[in-house]
Image (spheres, helix red, strand yellow):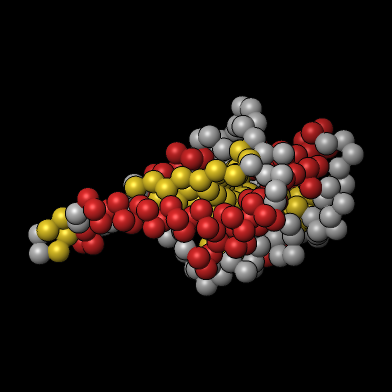
């Protein structure tokens, strides 16, 4: 059993509860405890009455909603996994920063793609996006529900520097799920790169880039085949927009893995596209 927990954030919305469901199942697979957190998102200088008033303040109502969100999420997780060790915690501070920090030292942080409103701001573009691009560990953004397990983990391969940690996560995930890994590298030459003095990049040049990318991907995956001999591996090099390609990949995998740099302070075009349009859970994994 892992001593590190899986952390799931909730604000009471159905989207965040689906994230808790996913986190509970993942905790069972990994033999890890589940910690469910909620950020009440009090406005600056707001405090609860703490028994000093007979009237409920706005801050009391927000805290009450947070209590309810935690209780509902814990009950839902317990129904999915009755023997799962579950802990719940309120978070202080701004929701985006508080939720992101709660994943420090965890196996992963799991968040929903949208939420109920402005206080907890669990919408992609605030809490989820911030966590997915700033957290010190892996962050799973759970979007649409998956009807049935496909037993396949997808990973987008971009450059050498950001691959190792993401590949480790993908192969470990495949191992615990008894699933396969499909690695995809998509490339396209922007108009400014494929034309020079009005001359379009020749087909031979495109073929060369395709061949080199395929060779690189094959060599890269050989190392991981040796490390995880029981995990089936396939790969594909696609000439096309990486964002659109990876969104398509998310429709046929149980989880899509993307690498990211620690210094990244905002989603790039590819990550942004995938987080906003993926058909299933997406995890961003910081480089080692």
Residue drawn 19% across the image and 54% down it: 202
> Of residues 204 and 56, which is closer to you in this image?
204
> Of residues 187 and 137, which is closer to you in this image?
187
Q: Report the number of numbered marks.
A: 0
> Of residues 235 and 41, which is closer to you in this image?
235
Q: Hey, which quadrant is residue 255 in on the image?
A: top right
Residue at the limit of the structure toward the right, as seen here: 83
Point out residue 168 in the picture as x, y percentages from the top left corner. Answer: 65, 57
Residue 40 lies, with reference to residue 14, above or below; the image says below
> Of residues 283 and 76, which is closer to you in this image?
283
Would you say residue 57 is visible in this rendering? no
Residue drawn 41% across the image and 44% down it: 245
Residue at the limit of the structure toward the top, as seen here: 147
Q: Hey, which quadrant is residue 21 in on the image?
A: top right
Point out residue 235 in the picture as x, y percentages from the top left corner. Answer: 51, 46
Residue drawn 64% across the image and 27% down it: 148
Point out residue 230 in the picture as x, y percentages from the top left corner. Answer: 71, 44
Point out residue 3 in the picture as x, y percentages from the top left corner. Answer: 85, 58
């Amino acid at each position: 059993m892992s001593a590190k927990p899986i952390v799931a954030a909730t604000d009471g919305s159905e989207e965040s509860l689906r994230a808790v469901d996913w986190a509970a199942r993942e905790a069972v697979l990994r033999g890890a405890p589940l910690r469910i957190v909620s950020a009440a998102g009090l406005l600056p200088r707001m405090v609860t009455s703490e028994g000093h008033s007979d009237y409920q303040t706005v801050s009391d109502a927000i805290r009450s909603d947070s209590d309810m969100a935690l209780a509902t999420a814990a009950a839902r997780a317990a129904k999915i996994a009755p023997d799962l060790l579950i802990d719940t915690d309120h978070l202080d501070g701004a929701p985006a920063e508080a939720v992101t920090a709660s994943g420090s030292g965890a196996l992963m942080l799991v968040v929903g793609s949208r939420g109920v409103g402005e206080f907890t701001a669990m919408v992609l573009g605030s809490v989820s996006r911030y966590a997915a691009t700033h957290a010190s560990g892996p962050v799973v953004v759970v979007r649409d529900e998956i009807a049935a397990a496909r037993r396949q983990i997808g990973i987008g391969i971009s450059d050498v520097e950001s691959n190792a940690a993401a590949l480790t996560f993908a192969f470990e995930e495949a191992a615990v799920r008894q699933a396969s890994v499909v690695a995809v590298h998509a490339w396209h030459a922007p108009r400014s790169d494929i034309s020079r003095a009005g001359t379009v990049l020749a087909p031979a040049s495109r073929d060369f880039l395709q061949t080199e990318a395929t060779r690189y991907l094959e060599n890269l995956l050989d190392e991981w085949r040796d490390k995880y001999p029981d995990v089936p591996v396939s790969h594909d090099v696609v000439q096309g927009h990486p964002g659109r390609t990876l969104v398509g990949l998310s429709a046929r995998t149980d989880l899509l893995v993307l690498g990211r740099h620690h210094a990244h302070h905002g989603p790039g075009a590819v990550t942004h596209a995938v987080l906003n349009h993926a058909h299933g859970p997406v995890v961003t994994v910081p480089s080692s």
